[in-house]
Amino acid sequence: MTMIIEGEYLLPAERQEVWEALTDPVVLQRCIPRCEAVDRLSETEFEGIVALKLGPLTVRLRGVLTLSELDPPRSYRMVAKARGGLAGFAEGSSHVRLEAAGEGTTRLIFEGGGALGGRLAYLAEGLVEGAARSVADRIFGDLRAYLQDNRAREADEKDRAPNLGS
C-alpha cells in the first residue's frame, strides 16, 4: 500500500533555527506523535521507536531515519525505514525545503510518500493516507508550537537580563 502526502507550513522562526530543530533528536521526539525514543547515530542518521495506533491496535515500529542531499539551511531528503516485527514494515521518503517567508518566518514545504507492508497494510487499508496527513500536520504543528515557545522564552530572558548600560 503506497501513499503520497505533501504540505506547506509557516513556522515562526528563521530558516537556520527551523533547520536546527528538524535535526535535533530531542525536538524530533517531542514533535513526532507517539514517539518513544529518538537517538542520533551520526550527523545524518537517527534511530527511533514510534507506537503506531491503528484502530484498536498499537504497533511499535523501530526504524532508522537517514538525511541526504543536505543543503543547510535550505533543504534535505529524508528516508525512513521501520519494522514492526510480525506486524510488517513502513518505509517512506520525502523532500523538505525551507524558504524565507518574511522576517522571522520560514515556509516549510514537504513532499513525500511511503508504503506499508505486511499486516500493517492490511489493517490500515483506507485509513493510511488520511492518518499520514494528520500525522504530518501534527508534527509540523508541534514544531510550530516548539518554535513559538522558544521565541517566547528568549524574549522573556532578554526582558529579565539586567541593563548594564545604565
Image (tube, rainbow, N blue to C red):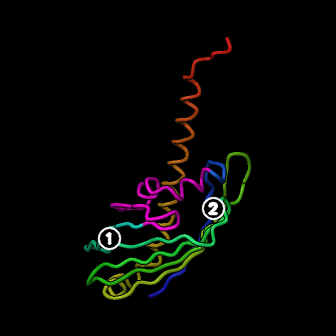
Tell whether label 1 touches label 2 (CB within 8 Å): no
Residue 53 tag number: 1
Marks 2 and 1, how far apart at CA: 26 Å
Up-down relation of residue 48 to residue 149 (above or below)? below
Q: Residue at point 34% right, 79% down? A: 83
Q: Residues within 10 Å of mark 2 (few under 14, many from 20)?
A: many
Q: Residue at point 30% right, 74% down? A: 55
Query: Quadrant of the rendered structure where residue 35 is?
Result: bottom left
Query: Quadrant of the rendered structure where residue 157 is?
Result: top right
What amino acid is labelled 1 in the image?
Lys
Residue 88 tag number: none
Q: Residue at label 2?
A: 108
Position of the C terminus, as image quadrant, is top right
Up-down relation of residue 69 to residue 28 (above or below)? below
Q: Residues within 10 Å of mark 1 (few under 14, many from 20)?
A: few
Query: Quadrant of the rendered structure where residue 34 is?
Result: bottom left
Report the magenta residues as a range: 17-46
Label 2, secondary structure: give it: strand
Residue 132: x, y in percent?
A: 46, 73
Q: Residue at point 51% right, 49% down? A: 145
Check the image and name the residue furthest to the front: 42
Label 1, secondary structure: give it: strand
Residue 41: x, y in percent?
A: 43, 65
Between marks 2 and 1 in the image, the one whose residue lies nearer the viewer = 2
Relative to 158, is 91 on the left or the right?
left
Relative to 112, is 123 on the left or the right?
left
What amino acid is labelled 2 in the image?
Leu
